[in-house]
Amino acid sequence: MSLLRIRKPKTRKGKKVLLAREPQLIESARTMLFVDGRKCAGNVKLCMKDLQQLKKPLVKVLNRKNDITPFDDPSSLEFLTMKNDAALFSFGSTSKKRPDNIVIGRIFENEVLDMFELGIKRYQSISDFKNEKIGACVKPCLVFNGPKWAQTEELRRLRNFFIDMFQREKVESIRLQGVEHVISFTVNDDMSILMRSYKILLKKSGQKTPRIELEEIGPSADFSIRRTKIASEDLYKLARKQPKQLRVTKKKNLSTDALGNTKGRVHLGKQQTGSIQTRRVKALKKSPEEKRADRQKKKVALKAAAVEALSATE
């Protein structure tokens, strides 16, 4: 009965926290929770640290070690994400059976939606690249190389998770100098995932558009997919459902040409031209200037007629 109990806030701050946890019409960028397992060292620790740096400031880190097995019992992980108000999580651990193991996933309605277990085959941290880095809180440009990302449902969901993971606030327009960071994901023939991170350099090209060069800044990782747990199609569709207020409704009789101009079509009913009042309508009356011009034209015409009559009698 305690699970079905409705929690009522006792203070104003508690009410504010519960309202923030409720579904919002426009959701903010998602926070990621980083959790350490019983044993977490070496490449796992370096990878978690670099992911935190890429995801900042939308991160929450738990430094205590947790005895959690996400694929066997995810309830502890679901509780930690709910307590820290995080929709994404990353769980790092290492063992003899699964060395250098990272579990990443996302939450929907306080339950695990998708979960992927990745093994680290090779790793180079950001500190291993001795070059100039980018600033913090930079929105990266994601590149998914090759057609294999669309071959299986697991890879499609993993691609969608990476987009969800590095998603930040929406912007209406971008500046070319503001695009500084590129993260590339590639699927090999052995189904391993290659993750590379580059800094965008704008060089002089002698033209208006600059020449683009990429410089690797780390992290650089090779992952192998070990286990996956994805949601059913119905649950996945429910998680992606948009509220009616945000749906873009198609406007009738509007079209856009090749130049981007919007054109509209107006439908008018049958006009009763026979019953239109045309006598003594102010809009049809002549202005004083027009009346003077007409009088002047009549005078000129009368003079011309008189001159012609005189010339004919002579």
Image: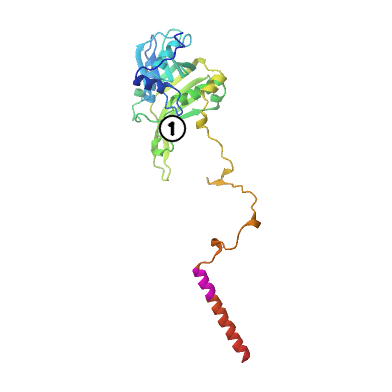
Question: Which element is circle 1 on?
Answer: loop
Q: Quadrant of residue 100?
A: top left
Residue kind at label 1, given as amino acid type? Lys
Question: Who's the residue at 53% across and 21% down the image?
Answer: 236
Q: Position of residue 143 (x, y in %)?
A: 47, 29
What is the chief secondary structure element of the magenta stretch?
Answer: helix
Query: What span is colored magenta in the figure?
Result: 288-295
Q: Is residue 223 above or below residue 254?
A: above
- Does the stretch in magenta take in 304? no
Q: Position of residue 176 (x, y in %)?
A: 41, 39
Res. 247 visible in picture: yes
Q: Is residue 293 above or below residue 127?
A: below
- Does the stretch in magenta take in 289? yes
Q: Is residue 290 above or below residue 224?
A: below
Q: Is residue 86 left or right of residue 265?
A: left
Nearest to the observer: residue 170 or residue 226: 170
Q: Position of residue 146 (x, y in %)?
A: 53, 27
Res. 101 visible in picture: no
- Most distant residue in the bottom direction: 314
Quadrant of the snapshot with the C terminus:
bottom right
Q: How is the image coloured?
A: rainbow
Q: Which residue is mark 1?
A: 170
